[in-house]
């Protein structure tokens, strides 16, 4: 019987899966895909891809960590008159509602069936209108003469906005498998507390491709009604 003097190394087969590009992406860009309920990072091959294009990529679940599309403070990326920036500054709850509708979350920031998440935008619009009306009615004549009711209304609105921003950011970060880099364990809360406007604007850019899609001021998703919501 012939014997081999050395053992051949065992090479594990690479698992290849077919994925669909969520939008037009350049060569080297990355996005999250899912295979057998496991998310993993896909790197766009040479030549780039178009929206909806199918291509084969290696399944590497150990490389599933992703990152934000852009910086937390890149609010002016699309110009100072972009709806995502103006709404974040003037009506942050409206922009947050548009992001939540894209993510199919109800007004409490939880995944919900269509019968619930379609109500998120109108509910937040009513809350915003109610806040502005009450603030106007109870607005003090002198700045240092604010009534308890006026202060309570501002505190309640600010607290609700901060809490919802925290919940939505946490949801997006977990959905896209983005690791915390600062204030680990409290990053979502810190961002919501320190600058909710910048955080909300970043969430809008993270959940839509403004390079390919037009932003709309007052649609339920902040995108054209006929556009497909970007879900990676």
Image: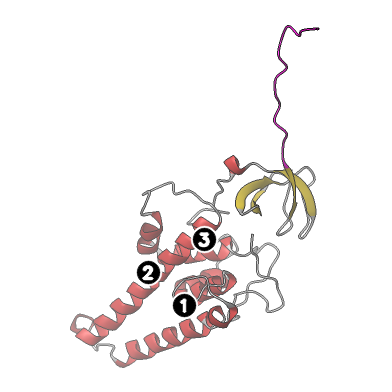
Determine the secondary structure under disc 2.
helix
Crowding at mark 1 (Cα within 10 Å: few <14, some 14-19, many 20+): many
User: Which residues are the magenta region?
Assistant: 1-15
In the picture of the structure, the residue carrying the numbered disc 3 is 172
Q: Are marks 2 and 3 in contact (CB under 8 Å)?
A: no
- Estimate the x, y position of residue 119 in percent, counting from the top left: 53, 83
Crowding at mark 2 (Cα within 10 Å: few <14, some 14-19, many 20+): some
Marking on residue 163: 2
Q: CA distance from mark 2 to mark 3?
A: 14 Å
**Is residue 74 in view from this perspective?**
no
In the picture of the structure, the residue carrying the numbered disc 1 is 107
In the foreground, 27 or 176 = 176
**Predominant secondary structure, magenta span:** loop
Q: Is residue 78 within the magenta segment?
A: no
Q: Is residue 176 left or right of residue 144?
A: right
In the foreground, 116 or 231 = 116
Quadrant of the frame with the C terminus: bottom right
Q: Between disc 3 and disc 1, whose residue precedes? A: 1
Q: Between disc 2 and disc 3, whose residue precedes? A: 2
């Amino acid at each position: 019987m012939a014997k081999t003097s050395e053992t051949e190394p065992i090479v594990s087969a690479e698992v290849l899966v077919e994925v669909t590009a969520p939008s037009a992406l350049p060569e080297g860009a990355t996005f999250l895909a899912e295979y057998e309920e496991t998310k993993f990072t896909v790197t766009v091959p040479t030549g780039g891809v178009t929206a909806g294009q199918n291509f084969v990529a290696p399944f590497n679940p150990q490389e599933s960590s992703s990152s934000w599309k852009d910086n937390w403070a890149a609010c002016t990326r699309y110009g100072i008159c972009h709806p995502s920036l103006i709404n974040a500054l003037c009506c942050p709850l409206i922009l947050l509602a548009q992001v939540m509708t894209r993510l199919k979350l109800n007004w409490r920031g939880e995944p919900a069936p269509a019968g619930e998440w379609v109500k998120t935008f109108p509910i937040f619009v009513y809350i915003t209108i109610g806040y502005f009306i009450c603030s106007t009615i109870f607005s003090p004549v002198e700045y240092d003469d604010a009534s308890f009711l006026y202060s309570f209304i501002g505190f309640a609105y600010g607290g609700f906005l901060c809490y919802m921003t925290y919940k939505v950011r946490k949801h997006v970060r977990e959905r896209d498998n983005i690791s915390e880099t600062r204030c680990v364990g409290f990053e979502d809360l810190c961002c919501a507390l320190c600058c909710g406007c910048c955080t909300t604007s970043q969430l809008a850019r993270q959940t839509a491709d403004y390079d390919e899609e037009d932003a709309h001021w007052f649609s339920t998703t902040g995108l054209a009604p006929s556009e497909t919501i970007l879900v990676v």
